[in-house]
Image (cartoon, rainbow, N blue to C red):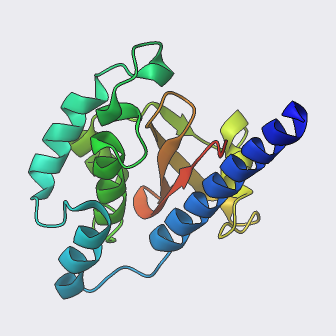
Amino acid sequence: MKDKKRKKTWLDASLKGLMAALLVTLVFNAEPAAPDSLVEKTTKGTGLGNVPIEKLTTEFKKIRKIKGHFDRGRWNSEVDQWMGRKHRLMIELGFRLTSGKYHRSDIGKLMDPPDQIVKKGHDLFKRITGQPGYDSLSAGSYEFLVYYWRGKHDFLFFTCDNNRIVNSSWWYAGE
């Protein structure tokens, strides 16, 4: 009986994670919003749509240094919780910094250097390019700037093509 209950719990959690990842993928793979609708679209999801980008990036740099449960620290709802402050900041930055006007160097200046830079041949490259929305033939020229949300467990990544940011998306462990 316990095994059935454990399987059901695991399955429920997996399905929730999959649905959340799908929702975020759909949001981040949408066409860039027109400037008038940018604040409206982002405010609905994170509540940070009216916050200037400079304030978002400054706060992200500070909160990024806090060790949470997934970084061998104590549980901290601001950094570990789904839709906690760090998660919402990262979602907002992922959305705003893919407007087409930012380059690889801009992301590093605004958010500090990424936790990893992933190129073809890197362990994460296949995992990222295996997601829906990536053409494996053209993905060879891509470079991904990876920013960890909860350790290496879940992360935001920006897709660079010839140093221009063309997209952002998420990798969720989906447990």
Specify the quadrant that holds the C terminus: top right
**Residue 35 in the figure: left or right of residue 128:** left
Numbered-mark total: 0
Specify the quadrant that holds the N terminus: top right
**Residue at position x 29%, y 35% in the image:** 78
Instruction: Examine the rendering and report whether any part of residue 25 can be seen.
Output: yes
**Residue at position x 58%, y 58% in the image:** 21
| Whole-percent x, y for residue 31 in the image | 44, 82
Q: Is residue 135 above or below residue 112?
A: below
| Whole-percent x, y for residue 26 in the image | 54, 73
Instruction: Tell me the quarter of the picture where residue 61 sits.
Output: top left
Q: Residue furthest front?
A: 1
Q: Is residue 21 above or below residue 151?
A: below
Instruction: Tell me the quarter of the picture where residue 64 sits.
Output: top left
The residue lying toward the viewer, choosing from 137 and 48, is 48
**Residue 18 in the figure: left or right of residue 166:** right
**Residue 77 in the figure: left or right of residue 123:** left
Instruction: Examine the rendering and report whether any part of residue 113 can be seen.
Output: no
**Residue at position x 80%, y 36% in the image:** 6
| Whole-percent x, y for residue 118 in the image | 58, 40
**Residue at position x 29%, y 58% in the image:** 92
Q: Is residue 58 above or below residue 49?
A: above
| Whole-percent x, y for residue 37 in the image | 23, 85
